[in-house]
Image (cartoon, rainbow, N blue to C red):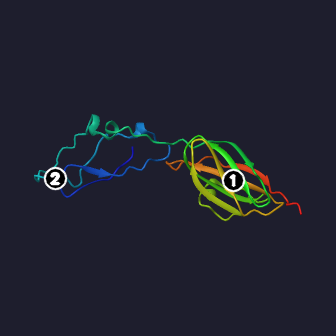
Amino acid sequence: GETVLLTHASSGTTLTGTYTVGAGKTSADLTVSSYTLTSAPTDSSGNIMSSTTVPTGSNNIAGAKAIVIDTTAPTLSSTSASSVASTTATLNFTSNEAGTSYYLIYASADEAPDAATIAAQGTAVTKSSAAALAAANTSNVTGLIAGTAYKAYVIVKDTADNSSTVSTITLTTTVPTP
């Protein structure tokens, strides 16, 4: 089991704390099974809380709210480049979850970045992040060099900070005709 440190206000009967969900945990793991008082709270009349009876039903975290732990990463599909010109292009992708999209564009011969580097918006030819819909999305890319092969690396992170796997989109900018 996990340990949650609970604190109380100077008066009142409410204990508060933060529970950080560990890797692999689910909402079924969120229930209070026992606790120990190291400093007992008092109510507004000054009565000291002495009971260590575990709350049940809606008074227990598991029964109080429908807590949902999102451990599912977004999935990207239908990835492509369109409207590729000499210095611009449009990246297209569909996400099954809303969140934030991130991309980095590298020269095609460069080593692929991991999802953490993409989200951190590391060094790249060009990069960006934007809101992503649980639907088809586009990102307009600028700052490219004519006649150059590139790879765009795209991820989406949902509101629970789950990251999709890296999707790679290849593109070659056009050479303008004189």
Front residue of 126 and 75? 126
- For residue 146, above or below residue 166: below
Report crowding for label 2: few under 14, some 14 to 19, many 20 or more residues within 10 A (C-alpha): some
Report crowding for label 1: few under 14, some 14 to 19, many 20 or more residues within 10 A (C-alpha): many
Which mark, residue 29?
none
Residue extending furthest right?
178
The Cα–Cα distance between marks 2 and 1, rounded to whole angstroms, is 55 Å
| Secondary structure beneath label 2 | loop
In the visual, does 9 lie left or right of 32?
Answer: left
- The answer to the question of whether label 2 and label 1 lie on touching residues, with beta carbons closer than 8 A, is no
In the visual, does 91 lie left or right of 25?
Answer: right
Front residue of 73 and 99? 99
Query: Residue at coordinates 42% horizontally, 39% vertically from top-left?
Result: 27
Q: Position of residue 178 (x, y in %)?
A: 89, 63
> Residue beneath label 1, please?
153
Quadrant assignment for the N terminus: top left
Query: Residue at coordinates 11% horizontally, 50% vertically from top-left?
Result: 47
Residue extending furthest top?
57
- For residue 83, above or below residue 72: below
- For residue 88, above or below residue 80: below
Q: Position of residue 15 (x, y in %)?
A: 26, 50
| Secondary structure beneath label 1 | strand
The part of the image, by quadrant, that contains residue 52 is: top left
Which mark, residue 42?
2
Going by the numbered disc 1, the residue's amino acid type is: Tyr
Going by the numbered disc 2, the residue's amino acid type is: Thr
Q: Position of residue 18 (x, y in %)?
A: 36, 52
